[in-house]
Image (spheres, rainbow, N blue to C red):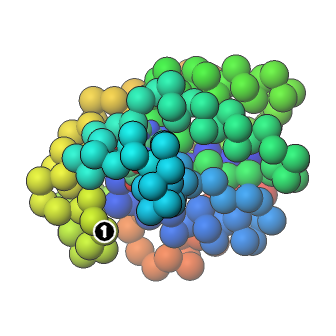
């Protein structure tokens, strides 16, 4: 199974994706994690992406599509994967559609998580990641609205999206997602 988890920053994509991956035996691919590791290891990618991530803006589509292309064509991905944090623009979504099509993967499932905006801000500030100060949080939510929200419209046209309320107990939300994915 291939799963794409959509939703604004702070909604719980990372937490839920990790749990879904464990339960369904999928590989969890978080583009945010890949980038943070690259920054920590000061790789060429990390050096390029650092300032962008810290400002709350998006890393270029070209770089991100390259990362995903490399990652999902890996042998270990054959048994299924879950994408967390990608795609974040319509251009990324279109590139992903093409990649999945080329790999003959046609059973992609999409989960959209949502919580009210004030809860998002509370969670983002609380988790205290380096790129989570009040200024970058506001910027990330703005970037989400203008660049990432249209991705949902894109998938509304081409695929079925499971809408899940991200407010509540982590395990209960997860059970709900897993039951929808395995129904
Ligand atoms: P995340 O952990 O998903 O919140 O990602 C942290 C940061 O990494 C984001 O604020 C972006 O700067 C960058 N990033 C992660 N995924 C993407 C993506 N698909 N496209 C562009 N930038 C991304």
Element type at mark 1: loop
Q: Classify 52 as above or below 18.
A: above
Asked whether residue 155 is in view, the answer is no
Q: Classify 1 as above or below 95.
A: below
The location of residue 119, given as percent across then percent down, is 24, 65
Position of the C terminus by quadrant: bottom right
The residue indicated by pointer 1 is 129
The location of residue 124, given as percent across then percent down, is 27, 65
Asked whether residue 97 is in view, the answer is yes
The location of residue 35, given as percent across then percent down, is 48, 51
Q: Residue at x 70, y 44 (%)?
A: 71
Q: Nearer the viewer, residue 61 or 26?
A: 61
Q: Classify 25 as above or below 9.
A: below
To which quarter of the image does residue 49 belong?
A: top left
* Residue with the most extreme left position: 135
Q: Residue at x 70, y 64 (%)?
A: 21
Q: Is residue 167 left or right of residue 126?
A: right
| Residue labelled 1 has its Cβ within 8 Å of some atom of ligand 1 | yes
Q: How many labels, in total? A: 1
Q: Residue at x 12, y 53 (%)?
A: 135
Q: Is residue 172 left or right of residue 55?
A: right
Q: For mark 1, does the 10 Å Cα neighbourhood hold few (<14), some (14 to 19), or many (20 or more) residues?
A: few
To which quarter of the image does residue 97 belong?
A: top right
The location of residue 64, given as percent across then percent down, is 52, 35
Q: Is residue 42 left or right of residue 127?
A: right
């Amino acid at each position: 199974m291939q799963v794409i988890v959509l939703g604004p920053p702070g909604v719980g994509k990372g937490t839920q994706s990790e749990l879904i991956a464990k339960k369904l035996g999928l590989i969890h691919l978080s583009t945010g994690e890949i980038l943070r590791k690259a920054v920590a290891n000061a790789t060429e990618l990390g050096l390029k992406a650092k300032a962008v991530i810290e400002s709350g803006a998006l890393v270029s589509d070209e770089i991100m599509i390259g990362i995903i292309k490399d990652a999902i064509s890996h042998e270990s991905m054959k048994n299924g994967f879950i994408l967390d944090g990608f795609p974040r623009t319509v251009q990324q979504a279109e590139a992903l559609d093409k990649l999945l099509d080329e790999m003959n993967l046609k059973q992609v499932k999409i989960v959209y998580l949502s919580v009210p905006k004030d809860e998002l801000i509370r969670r983002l500030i609380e988790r205290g990641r380096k790129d989570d100060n009040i200024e970058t949080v506001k910027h990330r939510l703005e970037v989400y609205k203008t660049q990432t929200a249209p991705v949902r419209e894109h998938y509304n046209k081409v695929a079925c999206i499971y809408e899940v309320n991200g407010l509540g107990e982590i395990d209960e939300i997860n059970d709900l997602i897993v039951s929808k994915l395995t129904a």
